[in-house]
Image (spheres, grey):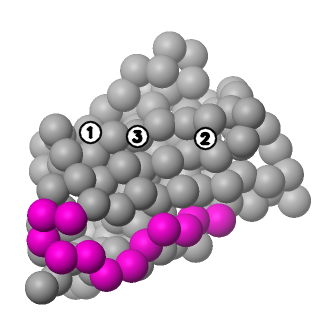
């Protein structure tokens, strides 16, 4: 059974950092595009970051470019999102996602991905 489980969310002050982890089980991440999405209260889901498995090229939304870093460790079957210089507007539920179809990050971040975790809450507040 395919499963994605996020961890690492929590409360952090503005300017602080958090690292989200997402452990995959039931399949191997090696041949999957990976992504992170978030949903703030009262807002639509936003594609935050994506990485293609074929060439490890990355995508970041304009709102997080320069502050967030996506990565993967295929040996640990885990994907990560390092979040630095956090702002209150980064608050939301963060979801990891994967897709075996190499449609490209522009497609994935707009239309979503095939398999999803249940989400981790990130709250940025003083």
First in residue order: circle 1 vs circle 3:
1
Disc 2 crowd, CA 10 A, few/some/many (<14, 14-19, 20+)? many
- Circle nearer the viewer, 3 or 2: 3
Secondary structure at numbered mark 2: strand
Residue 122, compared with residue 73, is above or below; it is below
Give x and y (percent) for residue 15: 13, 64
Quadrant for residue 105, please give it.
Answer: top left
Side of 69 relative to 85 (left or right): right
Instruction: State the count of labels.
Output: 3
**If the image is split into quadrants, where does the C terminus sit?**
bottom left
Report which residue position mark 3 lands on.
Answer: 70
Q: Residue at x 13, y 50 (%)?
A: 63
Residue 111, compared with residue 103, is above or below; it is below
- Circle nearer the viewer, 1 or 3: 3
- Real-space Cα distance between discs 1 and 2? 17 Å
Between 14 and 38, the one nearer to me in the picture:
14
Does residue 19 belong to the magenta stretch?
no
Report which residue position mark 2 lands on.
Answer: 99
Disc 3 crowd, CA 10 A, few/some/many (<14, 14-19, 20+)? many
The magenta region covers 5-16
Q: Which mark is residue 60?
A: 1
Q: Are marks 1 and 2 in contact (CB under 8 Å)?
A: no
Give x and y (percent) for residue 120: 47, 74
Does residue 9 belong to the magenta stretch?
yes
Q: Residue at x 19, y 46 (%)?
A: 67
Disc 1 crowd, CA 10 A, few/some/many (<14, 14-19, 20+)? many
First in residue order: circle 3 vs circle 2:
3
Give x and y (percent) for residue 102: 55, 26
Side of 37 relative to 97 (left or right): left
Give x and y (percent) for residue 86: 18, 62
Q: Is residue 91 visible?
A: yes
């Amino acid at each position: 059974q395919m499963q994605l489980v996020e961890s690492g969310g929590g409360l952090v002050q503005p300017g602080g950092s958090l690292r989200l982890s997402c452990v995959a089980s039931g399949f191997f991440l090696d041949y999957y595009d990976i992504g992170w999405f978030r949903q703030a209260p009262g807002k639509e889901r936003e594609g935050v970051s994506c990485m293609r498995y074929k060439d490890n090229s990355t995508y970041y939304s304009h709102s997080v470019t320069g502050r967030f870093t996506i990565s993967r460790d295929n040996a640990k079957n885990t994907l990560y999102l390092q979040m630095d210089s956090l702002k209150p507007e980064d608050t939301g539920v963060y979801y990891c996602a994967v897709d075996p179809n190499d449609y490209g990050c522009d497609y994935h971040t707009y239309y979503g991905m095939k398999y999803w975790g249940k989400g981790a809450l990130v709250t940025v507040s003083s």
